Amino acid sequence: MKFFLDSANLKEIKEASDLGLLDGVTTNPSLVAKENKQKDFKSTIKQICKIAKGPVSAEVISTDFESMKKEALILSKIDKNVVIKLPMTIDGIKATKFLSKKKIPVNVTLIFSASQALIAAKAGAAYVSPFVGRLDDISSNGMNLISEISDIFINYGFATEILVASIRNPIHIVDSARLGADVATLPFKVLLQLFKHPLTDIGLDNFLKDWNKK
Ligand code: G3P
């Protein structure tokens, strides 16, 4: 399973890279705005690409096909690792088809149903981003969606990768891995949670106490 960091925070991205656990990065307009980087979006994506050395998703702001195309072509020139993030809309899918024909990788985001994932894969998306946390937040089961998408992609041999997004906790990672999802994009906080277990802390503490007994 590849780990992407769901962040536009350069410090977090560097720390994740230094942990040796960074396979890529996903950003979105809210994450960029959180860092006040809307005006420096392109240079921020360039800096992230320098650190990550893997796929970096940069989301277009445009919502119509023509503007999406223009914006995507500009973003894709920032770095060879830029992946264009497009919303799961009719214009987004038309733009996905256009870009994938040009071999420009697309991550179709804001996916909440298996039918949306199927359409994105048929359009040639490199990744689909099903938002599991936001489904759980409304008492729908996000992991069921991952399972449905995985079955469909296996049935038809789609090369499109399942990039599990909107992750809220380590269980989302474990369940996604058990379902064979290709990528999980994690908030930095969740990445750190993956290391923690109280029995590990207690066990290490006791090892050291025993070692130092006189
Ligand atoms: O960046 C896409 C997705 O991971 C964001 O999810 O629900 O944490 O805003 P959320």
Image (cartoon, helix red, strand yellow):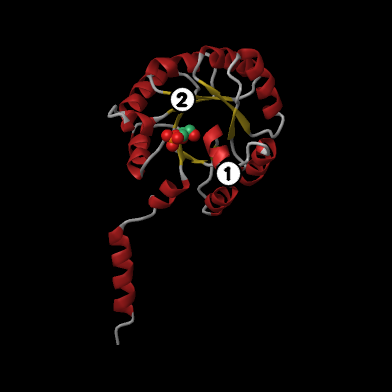
Foreground label between 2 and 1: 1
Task: Answer with the quadrant where ligand 1 appears in the image.
Answer: top left
List the single residue furthest toward the bottom. Answer: 214
The x and y percentages for residue 71 are 67, 23
Name the foreground residue: 184 vs 160: 184
- Ligand 1 near label 1 (Cβ, under 8 Å)? no
Q: Mark 2: give few (<14), some (14-19) or many (20+) Cα within 10 Å.
A: many
The x and y percentages for residue 138 are 31, 29
- Residue type at mark 2 is Leu
Q: Is residue 32 left or right of residue 74?
A: left
- Residue type at mark 1 is Glu
The x and y percentages for residue 98 are 63, 14
Closer to the N terminus: mark 2 or mark 1?
A: 1
Residue holding disc 1: 35
Residue found 67% across the figure and 37% down from its top? 39
Indicate the quadrant containing the N terminus: top left, top right, bottom left or bottom right: top left
Marks 2/1: CA–CA distance: 21 Å
Residue holding disc 2: 110
The x and y percentages for residue 89 are 50, 16
Residue found 52% across the figure and 22% down from its top? 87
Indicate the quadrant containing the C terminus: top left, top right, bottom left or bottom right: bottom left
Residue found 70% across the figure and 40% down from its top? 43
> Is residue 23 in view?
yes
User: Would you identify the image quadrant in which residue 92 lies?
Assistant: top right
Tell me if label 2 and label 1 are in contact, CB under 8 Å: no
Describe the element under mark 2 as helix, strand or loop. strand
